[in-house]
Image: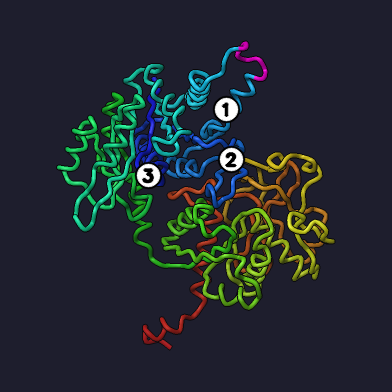
Amino acid sequence: MTKYIFITGGVVSGLGKGIAAASLGLILKSRGLKVVNQKFDPYLNIDPGTMNPFQHGEVFVTDDGAETDLDLGHYERFTDATLSQSSNTTAGRVYLTVLNREREGGYNGGTVQVIPNITEEIFRRMMLSTTETNADVIITEIGGTVGDIESLPFIECIRQMKYEVGEENCCYIHLTLVPCMKKAHALKTKPTQHSVKELQALGIQPDILMLRTETPIDDATREKLALFCNVDTDCVIQNLNAKSIYEVPLNMENEGLGDAVCKTLGISGTSTKLADWAKMVHVFEHPKQHVTIALVGKYIELHDAYLSVVESLTHGGIANETEVAIDWIDSENLATDEAAEERLKNADGIIVPGGFGSRGIEGMIRTAHFARANGVPYFGICLGMQIMVIEYARNVLGWSDAHSTEIEKSTAHPVIDLMPDQNGKILGGTLRLGKFACAVSPETLAKKAYGTDIVWERHRHRYEFNNTYRADLERAGLVVAGVNPERNLVEIVEAPNHPWMLGAQFHPEFKSRPNKAGPLFRDFIAASVAYKGTRADPLQCAEDGNT
């Protein structure tokens, strides 16, 4: 019988339910169990695909083309899973399905209500991962905070779940905040008590409390919360702030989370094997060198907008035993060539990630020009690849008006454009989403990185390299290093006579893992380390007594 774990949050948002769910997934997987994580979000958008990154952060994309919550990235990176459309459901999707069914006569003229119709649709979607994966354990994170009006149908659904699958097959974990009043040197348990009370009023008694805290929780506080919240003392789990998110699974296991969950669900005969993960964390925390990567984008005020890119840069650093520091640069501030040079001159490598719209584009083009002209390692992802093509067309071919029709529809040289079969579709329908093949050209940076002729990477973009200009660009030296064999679409470009300058139309960050870095990120960081080694640092030389 499949076991079901539900993780809810209380007191405040932003406590890290996603990291907690991912960490638990890793812990249980390391015990030999087949684990699948999923996220249910109470907001009314169908998915986060059309949401502003400042509102929601990054949109994570699965192999089958689902635009999902960024927490699915944590799930995949921690458990090395491949999730799907069924792994993320929103209230908007649930209500849309129910209302469409009502319009089609699916309820035989009956009154459609939150209970049972909405909750039944939530339940149906919660069970999809069970039927699709045959997993031993399904971990479901409920978005938002207990007490939010919009989350009530989801809470009601997981309350009913124990009657559907058996109480012995359900485990409820409630993650709350235990603040510390520093002047009084006292941990405060009342917020957790009230949050649990609210959850109990909705019919759910948590089996495990996970306590997010900046201060270690003493035994007296642990026993008090166990007594007042009606849980066993060994099921009160401290979630102390960690040095990195990669430490959290190790900390949670040391706190007894795996044992508490297995005891609750009647899972026996398993032991945790996290030695490889611990080794990776050790390498991460004890780097041999340091590089600074300039991340030039348009959403830098909210770092979560580039979450998977940042994590993948870290993975590349781990693979090279290198600490990666990110210099966040707003492309709008690179208004002149001089401003770009001044801001970028200390970078060991430059990355331009994806994005939509015209804001900050010229600053990105100046960034690509600076990297190409000065031999600085450059990695362009999606929009960053298109920027690289535009810059090359302008400054090598001399097409000063070269552009993307996303930005300038009247350009005489639309080197980036919509494909003919994309015209006339609704906004979301024009995107190329999900996993596509890329045939990698021999003797290229891409081939060296991947070591294979065909790679599969995930996409989320609307505009493409315009093949009308491919011959001209190649004659001018631009290297087409990867092509989608099905539609002959350019996927990877590289600059000639440059130590490492590569643009990928796909998003390799979605498949990178902390203990198995994406090949392009691994080699980009390696190139940045090499580039840093070619530059003399006068201050360091003086300190070392060298000339």
Q: Quadrant of the C terminus?
A: bottom left
Seen at 37% across and 38% down, the residue is 9
Q: Label 2 belongs to which residue?
A: 67
* Left or right position of 207 against 536: left
Res. 447 visible in picture: no
Q: Which residue is at a point 37% across and 50% down the rendered structure image?
A: 246
Q: Quadrant of residue 406?
A: bottom right
Who's the residue at 34% across and 42% down the image? Answer: 11
Coordinates of residue 13 in the picture (x, y in percent): 40, 44
* 356 relative position to 172: left or right: right
For marks 3 and 1, the one nearer the N-term is 3
Residues in magenta, as a range: 103-109
2 or 3: mark nearer the eye? 3
Numbered badge on residue 77: none
Determine the CA span between mark 1 and mark 2. 18 Å
Farthest residue to the top: give it.
Answer: 108
